[in-house]
Image (cartoon, rainbow, N blue to C red):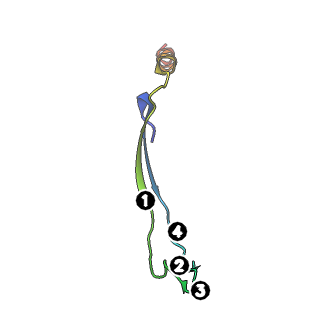
């Protein structure tokens, strides 16, 4: 969602699992391990943003002019 004055709010959720449970790794001695086997995790996050250096005078001046034209 984008709000006036450059403020944004974002929510993301990933349906697929984050870890590959079939991943295998070997150490220097030839031992094979599966570190993510049985580990189930999904990722979600909320992000807040704000445009610090946005030139809002031009944007809001145009918005006000368009709004004023709609009343005539």
**Quadrant of residue 45 within the rendered picture:** bottom left
Q: Residues within 10 Å of mark 4 (few under 14, many from 20)?
A: few
Q: Label 1, label 3: how many angstroms apart (C-alpha)?
A: 36 Å
Q: Residues within 10 Å of mark 1 (few under 14, many from 20)?
A: few
Q: Residue at x 58, y 80 (%)?
A: 28
Number of numbered callouts drawn: 4
Position in image of residue 4 (x %, y %): 42, 30
Q: Are marks 1 and 4 in contact (CB under 8 Å)?
A: no
The nearer-to-camera label among 3 and 4 is 3
Q: Which mark is residue 44?
A: 1
Which residue lies under the disc numbered 2?
A: 21
**Distance from the alpha carbon under mark 2 to that under mark 1:** 19 Å
Label of residue 30 in the image? 3
Looking at the image, residue 71 sits to the left or right of residue 30; the answer is left
The image shows residue 9 at horizontal and vertical percentages of 42, 43
Mark 2 nearby-residue class (10 Å; few <14, some 14–19, many ≥20) = some
The quarter of the image holding the N terminus is top left
| Mark earlier in primary sequence (2, 1) | 2
Decide which of 9, 49 is in the foreground and name it.
49
Q: Residue furthest front?
A: 29
Disc on the earlier residue, 1 or 3: 3
Viewer-nearest of labels 4 and 2?
A: 2
């Amino acid at each position: 969602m984008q709000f006036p004055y450059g403020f944004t709010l974002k929510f993301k959720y990933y349906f697929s699992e984050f870890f590959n449970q079939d991943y295998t790794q070997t150490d220097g001695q030839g031992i094979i391990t599966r570190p993510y086997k049985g580990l189930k995790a999904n990722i979600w996050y909320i992000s807040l943003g704000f445009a610090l250096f946005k030139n809002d005078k031009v944007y809001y001046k145009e918005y006000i002019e368009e709004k004023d034209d709609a009343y005539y």
